[in-house]
Image (cartoon, rainbow, N blue to C red):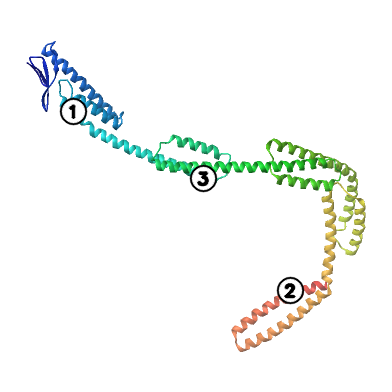
Amino acid sequence: MTSHQWGRVDDDGTVYVKTADGERSVGQYPEGTPEEALHFFTERYDALAFEVELLEQRIKSGVLSAEEAAESVQTVRTQVTDAHAVGDLDGLVTRLDALAPVIEGQREARKAEKAQRAAASRADKEKIVAEAEKLAEGTDWRNGANRLRELLEQWKALPRIDRASDDALWRRFSTARTSYTRRRKAHFSEQHEKRDAARVVKERLATEAESLADSTDWGPTAGRYRDLMQQWKAAGPAPRDVDEALWRRFRGAQDAFFGARDAATAEQDKEFAANAEVKEKLLVEAEALLPVTDVEAAKRAFRDIAERWDAAGKVPRDRMKELEGRIRKVETAIRGVEDEQWRRSDPEKSARADDMVSKLEAAIADVEEDLAKARSAGNEKKVRELEENLASRQQFLEMARKASADFSS
């Protein structure tokens, strides 16, 4: 009989392995020597040991899920328990059993990681839903649709969370998208209707503008073009493909009219240039009347100048403001001197001023009498009051005397 640390070979070639439960037969090797038999069965053990070591590495590296790892351990454990091999099979079983807490730790870690991913996914989805609902309430029709498509792609890339929460969030997201889409379609439908209505209005305005282009009734027609322009702006945009064409028609007619009016005005201005020269000479005469020393003489001279001014006729438009401003300045100066003289000689105002002086003088005399009595009585409080009253009335008297003197001059 040949022995080994973990087994032996009987004389009939039967090979046994030693375990904690005792010996058990693992097979026969009748064709070789006992040493060859042991070598054969120990190689089987080495293969099992390698498989156990490989499984340990795979489990500890985390490449297997907890379920896959537990299943693999059970499979290899069964192979070891029933193995036809010679070696420390109990040691292999112990190593396999030692993997159980490792697997459980990985299970818990992955469970926690899954929960963390789910929480992050929930937060991301809630954020997506909140943004979608905000977009659904807004009016960003240009960028909102594109942003909702981006949010949908972000949603698809996120892992699912528990079904109830995931479905509830998805319903909110889907409702927001549907609401936005309906409002967007309604908006553009309304815009389309408005643009069609604007097209009808602008076609009418362009047609009327073209009918006025050859008018020579400059004033009323210019006013009508201003009205048409206000109506054009109020009409809003027409469909893009016709709006620019209608505008070219409208603007072309308007330019034609105002171009003709400006040309006619320029021609008139040439004719009116001589009138401006006449009025410039009249201004020299008028401005020589200032400053006014004799109002009546100045008024007579200015009336004569004004008659010749009106007879001179129209002047170029770019000279009207300047020339009229200068002649009005002379007229205003003469009228101002005349008004001032009337104010000074107004009998009613002069009488009122004299009456005011008389009343103030009488009142001051009364106050002075009362003041003398208060001083004699030693009433200091009354003295102070009367002194203040007297000073105030004397100031008014001075002003009244000046006014009376102005009316007398």
Q: Position of residue 102 (x, y in %)?
A: 25, 33
Eyeballing the image, is 361 above or below 224?
A: below
Residue position marked by numbered label 2 in the rendering: 399
* Residue denoted by label 1: 93
Q: Amino acid at mark 3?
A: Lys
Q: Is residue 377 left or right of residue 328?
A: left
Q: Residues within 10 Å of mark 3 (few under 14, many from 20)?
A: some
Q: Is 247 or 208 nearer to us in this picture?
A: 208
Q: Nearer the viewer, residue 144 or 270?
A: 144
How crowded pointer 1 is (Cα within 10 Å; few <14, some 14-19, many 20+) is rated as: some
Which residue occupies 64% across, 80% down?
Answer: 387
In this picture, residue 269 sits left or right of residue 66: right
Residue ID for mark 3: 134
Label 1 or label 3, whichever lies nearer to me, is 1
Placement of the C terminus among the 4 image quadrants? bottom right
Q: Position of residue 304 (x, y in %)?
A: 93, 58
Q: Secondary structure at mark 3?
A: helix
The answer to whether residue 196 shows anywhere in this view is yes
Which corner quadrant holds the N terminus? top left
Residue at position x 15%, y 15% from top?
A: 39
Cα–Cα span, label 1 and label 3: 61 Å
- Residue 30 — which label? none
Tell me the kind of residue under disc 1.
Answer: Val
Q: Residue furthest top?
A: 31
Q: Position of residue 27 (x, y in %)?
A: 14, 18
Q: Amino acid at mark 2?
A: Met
